[in-house]
Image: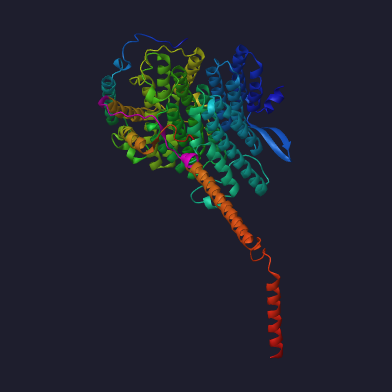
Amino acid sequence: MVDTSQGSTTRAASSWLSAATVLRALIILCIALFAADFVIAKKGKFAIEQVIGIYPACGFLSGVALLALVKPVIALLRRKETHYDG
Amino acid sequence: MAEVLAQLNPGIALIAGALLFPLLPHVLRGAWAVVLPLLVGWHVFTLNAGDAGSLTLFGQQLTTLRVDDLSRIFGLAFSLAALLVNVYALHLKSPLEATAGTLYAGSALGAVFAGDFITLFTFWEISAITSVFLIWSSGGERAYATGMRYLIIQVMSGVILLAGVMVHLNATGSIDFKAFQAVTWETWHTVPLATWLILLAFAIKGAFPLLHTWLVDAYPEATPTGTVMLSAFTTKLAVYALARGFPGSDVLIAVGTVMAIFTLIYAVAEDDLRRVIAYAIINQIGFMVIAVGVGTPFAIGAAAAQASASILYKLLLLMALGAVLLHTGTARASQLGGLARTMPWTAALCCIGALAISAPLFVGFLAKSLIFATVAKAGYASVWAVLLLASAGVFLVAGIKVTYAAFFARPNTPGLDTRPANTPPNMLAAMMLTALACVGIGVSPSAFFALLPGDVTYEAFKLENVITKVQLLAFAALAFAIAWQRGWLTLSAPGRLLDTDWLYRRLGRDAVDAFYRGAGSAYTAFAGAIRDLGRHAGRILAAVHQPETTLGGTTPTGAMAFWTTAVLAVLLVAFYV
């Protein structure tokens, strides 16, 4: 089996995986998952686990925090690739 | 024969088999590289529990084979990893990487079955020496320098281990590798020096914070195959050693929590995708270290599960990136993108690797569920909350970011999404086998749980557990998708992020340079002063000793007679007065 080119090679890669489509699908999935929080019985060890939306909030917060950190981290820590050379 | 096998450390078998690699032609070597880990894996599986392989060395009784549930699960994971990486390396004509990689796997395997510290130390050092060839195989000055840094740190870990063992032997008279006094916040000041030294050796190999830079420095500099091989063994061996030696050391919970968080900050902004995975490896070790710190039998089972799972999905992600590197010559996010079109199989398998980190029906989900259950049972609410964030975070950076940047982002290099890829079939086969293992274990956890130490029984597929973990991942993905759709997504920038290796690679080097410069200047100044002093002294001597000067000149006879008469006259007068 060889992993070779498949399909058209002239279209841009992003044309078949658009951000809008992915976002729409994820919004639908996330709404369904959030709604599930009202249905499932949670028996977690910690009281905070009973809070509606705690897992979605943690996931979203983690994602936002990390993505927001990219630019400050780059500004603060990025150096030339040759920084350690010579 | 059966008696010999019952005493045989599987690591020795793998090392002996690997030594044949350079002697065999390519096709035979490939066949042997596949059969050997299978045989060794079977040997691991069928070994009876207990101590064997007694040997006396320098008056000390060695136990070269100790089999229990903890060593067996690590042994099986290492054997499987050796098989997968050997399949991945089948296309290589040179025997160097396959030989070094299998020797390295054998030494790690030998270490997990070591019943005493001398045997452990021996395999510990062999693993350091054999693995460096996977970095040097890249060729060039940069790889050589990186390999030397890696080797120095790894050997240093071994030397510290040996020092600890010697102090321990002197104090206790034993080299038996068993649990030490736990290092806890209450008792740390009573912990003996030997224990600290041995813990430090394990911490270096385990890439603890501030000791971690060898990993993120070296792994991305190895060959595509070499990085895959390196990812599986060294750090997991350290986790095994910690689980064996320091269960219940609650200082490790704090260390693991730091590891799980700080690495994400680097991984999210790092440009080199193999270095992203390197940071993610440390993040995942953090989960294991936390479980070791809790230290209950269930927790040790969870740590072993996480180690085994982490080996598989990190192998898969690095295999995919290795294929990308082979095709494009780079693993940098700033130069990649759009490869899903030309490498659809690799893209799909990379997606499986991303999901296997923690999505239900994949191996990582089982392991992380056990870790969360461990922390919850122990009642560490704040650690549990941090792990939730870290779990979503590692999925975002090692899963979504890597897959997106390599395969689905708009190509950063023109033509990247149109140039046909020709990934060697053995690399694809290795990725498929690894993906199969990730899914196979993920959907059928009972056999996996049965292999774990600590009699782990856990109902992973409870609706609550599945839904909450999917919520965590889906909402992290949602944050990513919003940033992507709104055009806010910045994933990295070309260059290098400063890490604590700056301390010795820049500050330390500059300090040494400054010392040499200062010492050179001081020597020059001193030598100049001595020279000036000599010159000055010469001038003075010349001034008084040359002809016609005070000491060197000739005094007229008349003047001498005059002064002699004068002195005698003064004496005569003084005598009579």
> Does the magenta segment cover residue B488?
yes
Q: Mark yes or no: residue B180 visible.
A: no
Which residue is nearer to you in this view: B149 or B555?
B555
Q: Picture coordinates of residue A32 (x, y %)?
A: 27, 25
The quarter holding residue B154 reads: top right
Label total for image:
0
Q: Which residue is outermost to the front? A: B558
Q: Picture coordinates of residue B494 (x, y %)?
A: 38, 29
What span is in magenta?
B485-506
- Direction from residue B245 to residue B472 in the image, left or right: left
- Direction from residue A28 to residue B449 in the image, left or right: right
Q: Picture coordinates of residue B489 (x, y %)?
A: 30, 28
Q: Is residue A33 above or below residue B349?
A: below
- Direction from residue A6 to residue B232 in the image, left or right: right
Which residue is nearer to you in this view: B279 or A22?
B279
> Does the magenta segment cover residue B562?
no
